[in-house]
Image (spheres, rainbow, N blue to C red):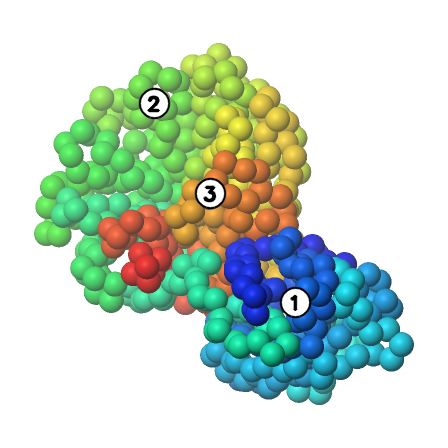
């Protein structure tokens, strides 16, 4: 075994030291193969908790007691047999190692076992000296041929895509409790959910090449509904689904739009009912959305890939922005009568801004701290020079977004991630067969430090982005999933849990990946659909199926 140091993440430390018992490991993480060495694969290393005794012999003799293990497999892609064991390491591995016996694992369930420490396997000539500090705790995953499921030591080509697909991603919770010599095992600490479980529900099967997604109360009944519609090249039709319960959604026809995937919702005429912008058209709610389609009007806007409502000129009235790689980046003043032509203003011409997608779902905010709204998009942010939206300056200083089949495309979400008083942003690479996820830390003037959250290697086209506090712990987490251009045959949905804590700046190592489900994901949106106080997700596929999905956050139900 070669020496290896990996970054570690501690989600929860339950160190209830008693006279006879101590918890030395209590972790929740995902085994995954991502093609870079700073992620957990099959061999994981953790630093001991700060109050683990530096001497495990005196005054309390744990070294001649027993270790009790509890392993909860939360998600495992197949029932392929694997083995699991644990180890201690001292200094460089040549100074001392001890490893427990391996146990067989197959299905996703909870496994419990115990073993005296003096029966652990000890490599020749470098036993652990338990009177000295242990500096690493190890978790090791093996396949059914007794090979470590990890490719970072160049053992050969045995780690095939088939083996990887059999074991990764695998989400686990691990606990190790030491009981002293002659002591009595008092039980494991409570194994709490660190991040909420999400139920997967099917909304409907409808359509192909659909975008323009929203979660909003369409019928004013007090709960949220689901909107999505066909691209202009796939039929133009837009529908909404009335939420009744997680497994019952009633479909209603809205009307014909004219957009690619860009759509957004707002009460455009102030009548108390939600309306919709769909590219060059608006759809006005008649107040009878269950009984009749919306009124459709052409407002002369661009046929957009992205659309978003925001106050661009600071007059207190809602405006709209739209992006098209066939025309450019624009914002529109909405007249008092929204059925009239909307006044267009250019932020960037097609020559300056040939970006397929970039200003959705939340790309407008004050970047430079001057009190007006700027715009973040692919590889650049645009400064609102005169605060009226009539003069713009491009800052080409965002190192993210790659040119692929449809050009450069990203999803953008502006927020103050590190709670320092200025706006940062999160982006995912979309229409990219092997996309990344990153957040960009603002120095206060619009210069950025990039923090990679998800690097290349998973083969996912991240054509969705939702940033929200999914676990209600006071900091912002991230959701995205694999879209139609994903290189991988498996299109996966993921959350990244921010473990930095409320008001703190998360480093790249302080994000925990949680695999949700293997489902295509495109233009996902988030909101509290069931009104229980946590954020849910609605999404659908683009060209790889017709399933619409509701991911129900079970945080409140499981409390």
Between the residue at mark 2 and the residue at mark 3, the CA separation in whole angstroms equals 34 Å
Q: First in sequence, mark 2 or 3: give its number.
A: 2
Looking at the rendered structure, the secondary structure element under dot 1 is loop
Q: Which residue is mark 1?
A: 60
Q: Which residue occupies the foreground of this view, 467 or 506?
A: 506
Between the residue at mark 1 and the residue at mark 3, the CA separation in whole angstroms equals 39 Å
- Say how many tags the image has: 3
Coordinates of residue 371 in the picture (x, y in percent): 45, 17
Q: Which image quadrant for residue 203?
A: bottom left
Looking at the rendered structure, the secondary structure element under dot 3 is loop
Q: Residue at x 35, y 50 (%)?
A: 535
Q: Which residue occupies the foreground of this view, 425 or 175?
A: 175
> Label 3 near label 2: C-beta < 8 Å?
no
Q: Residue at x 68, y 83 (%)?
A: 101
Between the residue at mark 2 and the residue at mark 1, the CA separation in whole angstroms equals 73 Å
In the rendered view, would you say 546 is above or below 418?
A: below
Question: What quarter of the picture does the N terminus occupy?
Answer: bottom right
Q: Which residue is mark 3?
A: 475
Q: First in sequence, mark 2 or 1: give its number.
A: 1
Q: Which residue is mark 2?
A: 333
In the image, taking residue 301 as reference, residue 244 lies left or right, namely left
């Amino acid at each position: 075994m070669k020496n290896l140091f990996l970054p570690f993440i501690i989600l929860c430390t339950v160190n209830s030291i008693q006279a006879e018992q101590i918890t030395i490991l209590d972790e929740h993480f995902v085994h995954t193969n991502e093609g870079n060495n700073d992620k957990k694969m099959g061999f994981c290393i953790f630093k001991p908790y700060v109050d683990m005794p530096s001497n495990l012999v005196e005054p309390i003799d744990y070294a001649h007691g027993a270790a009790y293990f509890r392993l909860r497999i939360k998600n495992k892609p197949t029932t392929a047999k694997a083995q699991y064991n644990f180890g201690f390491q001292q200094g460089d591995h040549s100074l001392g190692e001890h490893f427990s016996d391996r146990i067989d694992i197959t299905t996703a369930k909870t496994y419990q076992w115990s073993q005296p420490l003096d029966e652990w396997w000890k490599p020749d000539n470098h036993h652990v000296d338990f009177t000295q500090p242990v500096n690493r705790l190890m978790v090791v995953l093996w396949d059914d041929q007794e090979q470590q499921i990890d490719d970072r030591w160049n053992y050969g080509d045995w780690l095939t895509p088939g083996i990887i697909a059999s074991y990764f991603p695998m989400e686990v919770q691990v606990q190790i409790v030491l009981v002293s010599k002659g002591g009595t095992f008092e039980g494991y600490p409570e194994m709490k959910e660190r991040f909420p479980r999400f139920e997967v529900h099917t909304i409907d099967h409808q359509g192909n090449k659909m975008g323009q997604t929203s979660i909003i109360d369409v019928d004013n009944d007090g709960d949220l509904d689901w909107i999505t519609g066909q691209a202009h090249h796939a039929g133009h039709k837009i529908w909404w689904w009335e939420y009744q319960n997680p497994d019952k959604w009633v479909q209603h026809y809205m009307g014909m739009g004219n957009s690619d995937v860009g759509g957004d919702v707002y009460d455009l005429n102030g009548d108390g009912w939600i309306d919709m912008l769909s590219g060059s058209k608006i759809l006005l709610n008649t107040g009878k959305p269950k009984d009749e389609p919306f009124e459709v009007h052409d407002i002369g806007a661009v046929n957009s890939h992205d659309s978003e409502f925001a106050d661009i000129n600071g007059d207190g009235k809602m405006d709209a922005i739209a992006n098209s790689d066939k025309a450019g980046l624009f914002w529109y003043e909405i007249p008092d009568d929204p059925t009239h032509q909307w006044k267009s203003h250019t932020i960037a011409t097609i020559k300056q801004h040939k970006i397929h997608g970039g200003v959705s779902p939340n790309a407008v905010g004050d970047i430079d701290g001057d009190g007006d709204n700027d715009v973040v998009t692919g590889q650049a942010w645009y400064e609102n020079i005169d605060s009226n939206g009539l003069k713009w300056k491009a800052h080409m200083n965002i190192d993210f977004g790659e040119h692929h089949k449809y050009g450069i495309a990203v999803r953008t979400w502006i927020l103050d991630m590190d709670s320092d008083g200025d706006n940062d942003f999160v982006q995912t690479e979309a229409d990219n067969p092997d996309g990344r996820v990153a957040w960009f830390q603002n120095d206060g003037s619009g210069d950025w430090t990039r923090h990679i959250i998800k690097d290349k290697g998973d083969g996912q086209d991240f054509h969705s982005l939702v940033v929200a506090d999914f676990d209600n712990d006071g900091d912002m987490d991230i959701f995205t999933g694999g879209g139609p251009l994903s290189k991988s045959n498996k299109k996966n949905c993921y959350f990244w849990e921010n473990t930095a804590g409320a008001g703190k700046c998360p480093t790249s190592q302080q994000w925990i990946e949680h695999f949700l489900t293997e489902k295509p994901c495109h233009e996902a949106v988030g909101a509290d659909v069931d009104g229980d106080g946590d954020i849910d997700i609605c999404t659908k596929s683009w060209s790889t199926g017709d399933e619409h999905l509701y991911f129900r956050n079970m945080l409140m139900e499981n409390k």
